[in-house]
Image: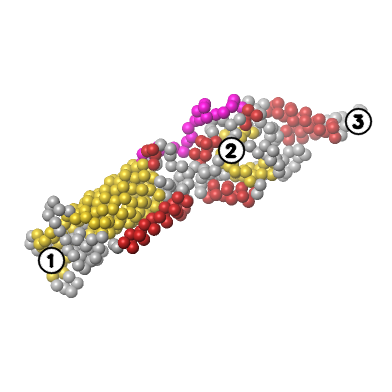
Amino acid sequence: MNKSFGIFIFICLSLIVNRVIAQTNGILGDRFFNNWSVSLSGGPNIFYGDLKEFRFLPATSPVNEIRFAGTFSLNRQLSHVFMLRAQVLYGEIAGEKRNYKNGAPCDRYFEGNIIECNLNTTINFSNLFLGYNPRRFFFVYGTIGAGVSTWNSKLKDLNTHEPVTGNGSPDTWNAALVIPAGLGAYFSIKDKVNLGVEWTLRGLNSDKLDATTGGFPYDSYSLLAINLTYNFNKRTTGKLDPATFQQQIGPPPPKTDLAGMIETEKKKEEAARTTENPPTPGSAVHDAAGLGKQLATAGTIQPKPPASENADTSFSETGVKGVTYRVQVFATHERIYSSEQIRNMFRLQQPVNKEFSGGWYRYTVGSFTSLDDARKLMNGFRFSKQVKDAFIARYINGRRAAPAPPGKVKFSRRKIYYPRPHHKK
């Protein structure tokens, strides 16, 4: 492998790294060991070079060309696409040849041992082309790297099994540059263990692996291995840890007094009607039907929460005029989760806004004056399956619009409604 080929490999790796960094999505973990893992693998090791009976398939007699090799790897996850591995391989190698291409007898075979050290990268094709998905458990990846391979090979006669020549004595080892490249796939088992299979072709910058020169310019060997990986990261359970007291700012919100809210709204409606249409002496101020209509609509009023309830809201649109849109990702009645916890749970890159209204703690992302921009963000969450039931919430002058009653359209004098979503509240 000449110098130009090495430069080509370096350029390819640089392009891959740039593409991978752009594909990073979410966080991997704050602890040091969160992003480290170790791997063990082993399987058949097959030689390709001058002393080989068949072009691709291994011979099994009189010399078995299928030998065993195993690897140990220390891995560092850099992103959801890119991982760096330091790998050590030890195994046996063998090959035989009865006749040359012109029909003349060869009757030679060799046996040897290999020790290899390399540094390689894996590129997760599943996350690269399909996007990161924390629920995915099957992955396909590619690998390429560079290292040094050392070996000790003995050439023997195929009929007498006597040594013919050797590529060094038992105490002499030869070394050459090795370029491993291949493909693999694995299953992730509860984020802690990966079980998969990997095939790599390892090309040498030498023609001496089989203790024979001439013919095949670069010897190589391939390893088909079963791979077992243990991840040191904390297992993802899909559940949120309760927030500590220090993570919550401000006093807890007051309990919602529904009866009081209805009574207050009734008085406001009555005062408004009295101001617009003063009653004449002797006329009825309210009739039964009007009172029933007020009670029916009072339950849909969204009261403005006290300032204490917005104390740990990370985003506010106070003073904003007109219609804006936000993408809601989560809601709960309990005040136990912070904005940062929700962001980490769904692995969102954008800041998460927390607000309280109508007895709900709602968590939203973004604030857009264009409905199309909000829809793009919502579709992005749904397409990547980060938040499968994300939806758009409408705000008027910085205040969340109330959901429309079932089967109703927009109406009412001082209330603003939008269609009730079919997702979570």
* Secondary structure type for disc 1: strand
Mark with earlier residue (2, 1): 1
What residue sits right under mark 2 in the picture? 353
* Secondary structure type for disc 2: strand
Q: Is residue 399 visible?
A: no
Report the Cα–Cα distance between label 2 and label 1. 76 Å
Viewer-side residue, 169 vs 283: 169
Q: Quadrant for the C terminus, please.
A: top right
* Secondary structure type for disc 3: loop
Residue 232 inside the magenta-drawn segment: yes
Mark with earlier residue (2, 3): 3
Give the amino acid at mark 2: Asn
Marks 2,1: beta carbons within 8 A: no
Q: Position of residue 390 (x, y in %)?
A: 57, 44
Q: Residue furthest bottom?
A: 102
Q: Position of residue 28 (x, y in %)?
A: 43, 42
Give the amino acid at mark 3: Thr
